Image (spheres, helix red, strand yellow):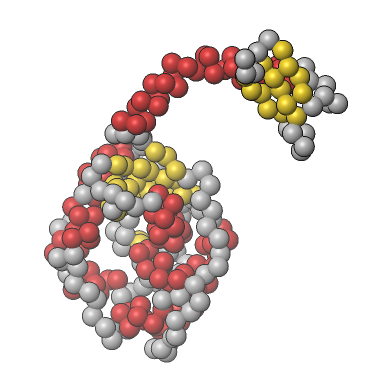
Amino acid sequence: MSVIEARSEAWHAERRKGIGGSEAGKIMAGEWHDLWLLKTGRKEPDDLTWVLPVQIGIITEDLNRKWFEHHTGIDVSTFGCDHLVHPDLQFMRANLDGFCAGGIFEAKHTSAFGKPEEIVSRYYAQCQHNMLVAGVETAYLSVFFGTLKWEWFTVEADPEYQAELMAKEAEFWAHVEKDVEPENRAASTVSIALDDMREVVMTGSNEWASAAADWLENKAAAKRFDTASKRLKGLVEPDVKLAAGHGVQVKRSKNGSLSITEMKR
């Protein structure tokens, strides 16, 4: 897709027919008024042709897709990704970056200083919206952080969040259909589940490489150390606050936990 095609009048006209994934975040953030002006044709959309972050995201989308496929082994198809419509809620629309087995693919580019948890939160509504439209329960979020780091995240369908998202989108779209100007709303208070989403490739980090080498070299010794620590603690009876001998001592704290230290000579 070229930049001109992506931002043509026909493209904007198609977007006015419903709510897209990139607009779901505004719905959940309560930013309704400006979006209503756009959907009712009272305001012209911003010209993003020469907005650098937007164009970098568009230009690197294909590279992002190939990078994701290479590093994860998950194939991505772009067939049938455009102009998707929810089977029941016709105002819910989506243009996807790709389909994967059992899920959808989203390609993003952000600052090299972006924080992973902030990225997931930023695109959480878009992922949940697009999953609803596509009828899947998994979204793969592939992110370039500047030019030096790439990470990918698995975002699972969140039924509670999706229920509120659909309700809010339906309420907003009623304002569009009835041509009733809405006020901005309070942002959604539905919590975002971020557990177990991050999948990180650290091959570009020299610090990681050094630490990984140390870990591999000392893995066996660390396991023996952990086993010996458990054995020593297991030998300390419940009424003992200090056990010492052979250069090692085990102390019991006031809360009952045991710590092992080397005895000073």
Position of residue 4 in the picture relative to residue 44 (left or right): left
Q: Residue furthest top?
A: 246
Residue found at x 52% / y 62%: 162
Residue found at x 64% / y 23%: 261
Q: Where on the picture, by quarter, is residue 66?
A: top left
Residue found at x 41% / y 66%: 25
Q: Nearer the viewer, residue 99 or 225?
A: 225
Q: Nearer the viewer, residue 71 or 97?
A: 71
Q: Nearer the viewer, residue 182 or 192?
A: 192
Up-down relation of residue 127 to residue 226 (above or below) = below
Residue found at x 31% / y 30%: 206
Residue 211 locus on image (x, y percent): 40, 27
Position of residue 124 in the picture relative to residue 256 (left or right): left
Residue 82 locus on image (x, y percent): 29, 58
Residue 27 locus on image (x, y percent): 43, 72
Question: Is any atom of residue 242 visible in this view?
Answer: yes
Up-down relation of residue 215 to residue 12 (above or below) = above
Up-down relation of residue 254 to residue 197 (above or below) = above
Position of residue 70 in the picture relative to residue 188 (left or right): left
Quadrant including the C terminus: top right
Position of residue 14 in the picture relative to residue 91 (left or right): left
